[in-house]
Image: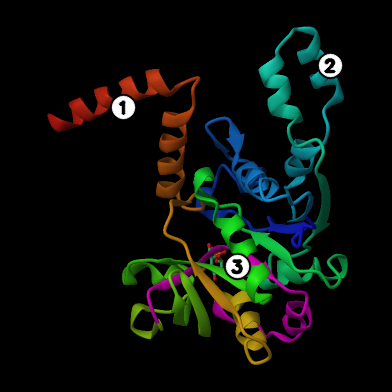
């Protein structure tokens, strides 16, 4: 079967201010969740959907991302020699993927980051993954979105219902329900106040987009926070073609935020065979101590 979505774009040029000082000279995307950098979870999610070409939009202090996805011949040889098979498999699992890097000269927003990839995408549809949204691997969000794209052949945005007190952190849509979990989008607003939010359905960091977003992005004026917003470009695109939303009801971690990052770390550690038993004991111990404070 031909793969409709072959490319994924991962914007990673942001400043990571919420994790300073850790992110002063190192990329936020390389912060580990247990033993894997945040961005690798998104790459593996896309790889599981048959995507093999990745365009990562980087910026200053982001070289570690390129090094991480580069082949590591000496390390692989040394692991081979010392018979560390599992580690060897772990570090060579992504070897067959292709990575290209584009440097965003200034952090001018998500829309701007995406527009940097325009010349490299041509006419085909593609996925966009924001790596600080981590999706529980068994929940298949991207795969479901790709299936929906095959049916509707128009852009698909991942949506999640959030409390009204949190809409200011997201792009929020006004959508008309077509069937379970599928909405036709009628309007989008970037980071509205609760009183101006068109609904409680927030865009989360997974998109299937079509190449006609690029000319629209070229004309978008700076919006919320003075940045070129993808949400504003999608509002422009909506005048030309339908856009759909897929309501995700699985588990997402907002690992771009300290609490979300810690929650992801704890949950993934509890599922990690190397540490889960000991870590669970430790957590139970803490919980028992906290009960008495
Ligand atoms: C970006 C988008 C926003 C979206 C969010 C999802 O915001 O601009 O529309 O809801 O990602 O994580 P950011 O988190 O980069 O501020």
- Identify the residue at horizontal 64%, vertical 46% (top origin): 39
Tell me the residue that label 2 is attached to. 77
Could you classify mark 1 by the number of other residues whose Cα lies within 10 Å: few (under 14), some (14-19), or many (20 or more)? few
- Which quarter of the rendering shows the N terminus? bottom right
Tell me the residue that label 1 is attached to. 283
Q: Along the line of sight, which residue is nearer the eye, 286 or 249?
A: 249
Q: Which residues fall within the magenta stretch?
A: 199-224
- Identify the residue at horizontal 26%, vertical 25% (top origin): 284
Q: Position of residue 37 (x, y in %)?
A: 62, 38
Q: Is residue 293 visible?
A: no
Q: Residue furthest bottom?
A: 239
Q: Is residue 205 left or right of residue 2?
A: left
Q: Secondary structure at mark 2?
A: helix
Could you classify mark 3 by the number of other residues whose Cα lies within 10 Å: few (under 14), some (14-19), or many (20 or more)? some
Comparing labels 1 and 3, the label whose residue is closer to the camera = 3
Q: Is residue 181 left or right of residue 12?
A: left
Tell me the residue that label 3 is attached to. 148
Q: Secondary structure at mark 1?
A: helix
Comparing labels 2 and 3, the label whose residue is closer to the camera = 3
Q: Position of residue 170 (x, y in %)?
A: 48, 69
User: Is 113 rendered above or below residue 29?
Assistant: below
- Identify the residue at horizontal 40%, vertical 42% (top origin): 263
Q: Secondary structure at mark 3?
A: helix
Q: Residue furthest left?
A: 292
User: Is 288 rendered above or below residue 132?
Assistant: above
Could you classify mark 2 by the number of other residues whose Cα lies within 10 Å: few (under 14), some (14-19), or many (20 or more)? few
């Amino acid at each position: 079967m031909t793969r409709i979505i072959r490319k994924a774009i991962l914007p990673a040029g942001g400043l990571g201010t919420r994790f300073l000082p850790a992110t002063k000279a190192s990329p936020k995307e390389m912060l580990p969740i247990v033993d894997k950098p945040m961005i690798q979870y998104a790459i593996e999610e896309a790889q599981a959907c048959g995507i093999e070409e990745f365009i990562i939009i980087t910026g200053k202090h982001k070289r570690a991302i390129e090094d991480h996805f580069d082949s590591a011949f000496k390390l692989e040889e040394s692991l081979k020699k010392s018979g560390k098979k599992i580690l060897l498999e772990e570090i060579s699992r992504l070897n067959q993927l292709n990575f290209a890097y584009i440097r965003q000269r200034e952090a001018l927003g998500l829309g701007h980051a995406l527009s940097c990839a325009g010349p490299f995408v041509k006419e085909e549809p593609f996925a966009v993954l924001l790596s600080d949204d981590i999706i529980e691997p068994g929940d298949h969000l991207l795969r479901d979105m790709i299936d929906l794209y095959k049916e509707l052949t128009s852009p698909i945005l991942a949506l999640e219902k959030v409390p009204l007190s949190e809409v200011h952190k997201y792009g929020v849509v006004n959508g008309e329900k077509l069937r379970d979990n599928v909405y036709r989008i009628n309007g989008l607003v970037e980071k509205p106040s609760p009183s101006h939010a068109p609904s409680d359905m927030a865009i989360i960091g997974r998109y299937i987009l079509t190449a006609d977003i690029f000319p629209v992005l070229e004309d978008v004026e700076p919006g919320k926070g003075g940045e070129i917003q993808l949400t504003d470009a999608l509002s422009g695109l909506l005048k030309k073609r339908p856009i759909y939303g897929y309501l995700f009801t699985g588990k997402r971690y907002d690992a771009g935020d300290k609490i979300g990052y810690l929650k992801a770390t704890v949950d993934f550690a509890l599922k990690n065979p190397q540490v889960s038993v000991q870590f669970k004991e430790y957590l139970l111990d803490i919980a028992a101590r906290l009960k008495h404070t």
